[in-house]
Amino acid sequence: MFKNFQPKSGADRTLVYLFCFIQKCLETVAKTPNDETKAKEAVMTLANENLGSISDPRFCIRDLVQVAPGQEQKLTTYLKQLKQECAKRLIADVLFHPEKGMDRKFWLAFGKRPYLGRKFYF
């Protein structure tokens, strides 16, 4: 799935965007593996960053999304909300869950490879 997933619908495009974002979060957490507070702050900072232009060539799903005129701001707001909710759940339920006790190293391994060859830019 990391190399050959073919998005066919809007939901698939949303998944690609979120997978790219999660990969970037895991990459960020891997840089501060021993400091939980800094890792959480880094993920939330990444989630709260403003998106640039969707038409920017570095935008990870630019070639998958066609935005109608006047709808770019609406899509940007939606994608930012997706990032924020995903980051909250990633921190609370996967990476830093106090009761699950699963070692983060298993999750951080997924941060080493870009999803579908796409790098999350914003």
Image: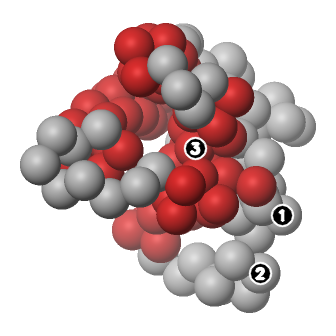
Residue denoted by label 3: 26
Q: Is residue 23 left or right of residue 92?
A: right
Q: How is the image coloured?
A: secondary structure
Q: Is residue 70 left or right of residue 85?
A: right
* Relative depth, front residue between 49 and 105: 105
Please state which amino acid type lies under the numbered disc 1: Gly
Query: What residue lies at 67% left-to-right and 18% top-to-bottom?
Result: 52
Question: Label 3's element?
Answer: helix
As displayed, is residue 38 above or below residue 100? above
Quadrant for the N terminus in the image: bottom right
Is residue 3 visible to us here?
Answer: yes
Compare marks 2 and 3 and give the one earlier in the sequence. Answer: 2
Residue denoted by label 2: 3
Query: What residue lies at 75% left-to-right and 69% top-to-bottom?
Result: 116
Residue denoted by label 1: 117
Question: Label 1's element?
Answer: loop
**Separation of marks 2 and 1 at Cα, in angstroms:** 7 Å
**Separation of marks 3 and 1 at Cα, in angstroms:** 16 Å
| Residue 63 position within the rendered picture, expressed as x and y whole percent measured from the top left | 77, 56
Question: Label 2's element?
Answer: loop
Compare marks 3 and 1 and give the one earlier in the sequence. Answer: 3
Compare marks 2 and 1 and give the one earlier in the sequence. Answer: 2
Q: Quadrant of residue 97?
A: top left
| Residue 68 position within the rendered picture, expressed as x and y whole percent measured from the top left | 55, 42
* Relative depth, front residue between 95 and 61: 95
